[in-house]
Amino acid sequence: MTTAFSTSVGNSPNNCKIILSGYLNELAVLPPMKKDQNLSIDLDAVVGINSIGTRKWCQWISDCTALFDKITLENCPVIFVKTFNQIADSLTEKCTVNSVKIPFYSEAIDERKMITLFLGKDYSFDGLFRVPDVKDSTGAAMEIDIITDNFFNFLKK
Amino acid sequence: MSPLLVRYPDFLTKESLQKVEPLLRDIFVLHYPTERAQIQNLHDPKRVIIIIEKASLKEVFALAERGYMQFVNKNRDDFSQELLFSALMVAKPTSFAGPSPMFLANFSPNTGPNEENHVSIPFTSNFEKHTILEKLNFFLMQDNKLLNLKELCVQVADEMYMNAMFSAPIDETNKHFFQNLRRDQNVSYPSGKSAKIFSCYSQSRVIIGCTDPYGSLRIQTLIGHLNAVFMNDLAKTKDNSAAGAGVGLKYMVENASLLYCFVKPGEFTFMACGFLLKGMKANLNENKNIHFIQL
């Protein structure tokens, strides 16, 4: 859970992709980036973030905004989406959250599943929010385990 | 506003009520927002429990700034029990002075804490944080109900740890000597001092808490920070401090369904967050219970 933070950067013409993983805290180092057209940030393997990590993220994403024309975020864990909704500078005008991982929960058997939702297909800037049917291991319907009223507030930023 | 025992004569069984009735006689409840007009006239808010019918956290902390210390949400299954806790905290705060998280987790005398459902991990330096959060993480992996809340719990524990490590320590002149250091620096408590992170869980709740040996936090200062953080919908990270600019506080309050803060100046600060074992949503909503005690 609190595994050390690491990054992996790959480049193709006009595009830069960075994979972040581990726990984003005061020891995490977010790398300086070089100017390019598009930046894709994969957050799938980020397991947590604390307040100092949040400050680092806000500063880094602000720096990236000055360097790239477009920034997309992929596979955002719920703990990160929560940050997008709670913290003012955590997303900038050039950021697009392309996909989010949402927990579904079955209280009867304490089962949890993470389901990835995609921009355009499951949610959109104009208010679309399609909750997929998710079944637990007994075949019963699972409940979405977020407060849907405000979960996509970050789209309004 | 009305006396607690008049407004809620049946919130305890007759047997329980007999035991605590003398203590609870002069405790009052005020329903918010229904009775908000009466707030202006109250002279001793510390004897009043605010019963939240519907309120944002911004409203709750604005009330706290006026001196109210106990907030119990009416729209919860644990209302009666939380009302009793609040009443006892008002009536006899010193009985909560031995910082024990057990009552917060809803233990009954027959299902008390044991080695499996309770962990307490002392620490003296920032260097240990990673290991201690790993231990907590391991503890939270033993039950599916806890597993669902692990990210929220660890995030809260991390913030508590940093507060205890960097904000709590004071010297004999009451100077917070680590407060302005960068949080990636390794610092240690002076010899003989230690703090601890603890957790315990029952069938219905898990508690994550931290206690430090300084008791340097002032509840009104904390409430002032909470007010500033919740004044706007979104918290800002840009300030000149070395800490998280209130973001940690926001995480602690918003993640949990229960916030408990008890300070005995010069002796200890005890912070705890409670999580209902019903998935994330049950904890992230605004139906929170909040208790402050400062002796």
Image: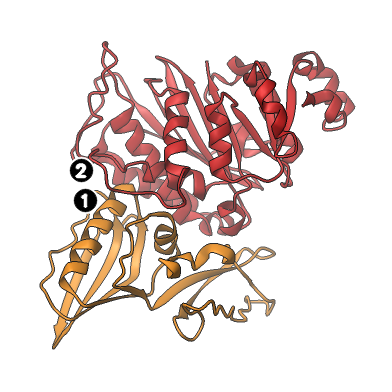
Chain colours: A orange, B red
Question: What residue is disc 2 on?
Answer: B184
Work out which residue is located at the far top of the displayed protein and give it: B172
Above or below residue A154? Residue A97 is below
Question: On screen, B269 above or below B149?
Answer: above
Q: Do the residues labelled 2 and 1 touch (CB within 8 Å)?
A: yes
- Using the image, name the chain to which the residue with label 1 belongs: A
Secondary structure under the numbered disc 2 in the rendered image:
loop
- Side (left or right) of B17 relative to B239: right
* In-image side of B79 versus A10 (left or right): right
Across and down, in percent, residue B50 comes to 68, 32
Give the percent coordinates (x, y) of residue B248: 38, 44
The x, y position of residue B225, in whole percent, is 41, 34
| Image point (15%, 64%), residue name | A31
Q: Name the residue under label 1.
A: A27
Q: Give the image quarter of residue A133.
A: bottom right
Query: Disc number at residue B41?
Result: none
Residue appearing at x 59%, y 78% in the figure: A131
Q: Percent from the top left, x then y, of residue A100?
A: 43, 73
In the image, taking residue B220 as reference, residue B57 lies left or right, namely: right
Q: Is mark 1 on a helix, strand or loop?
A: loop
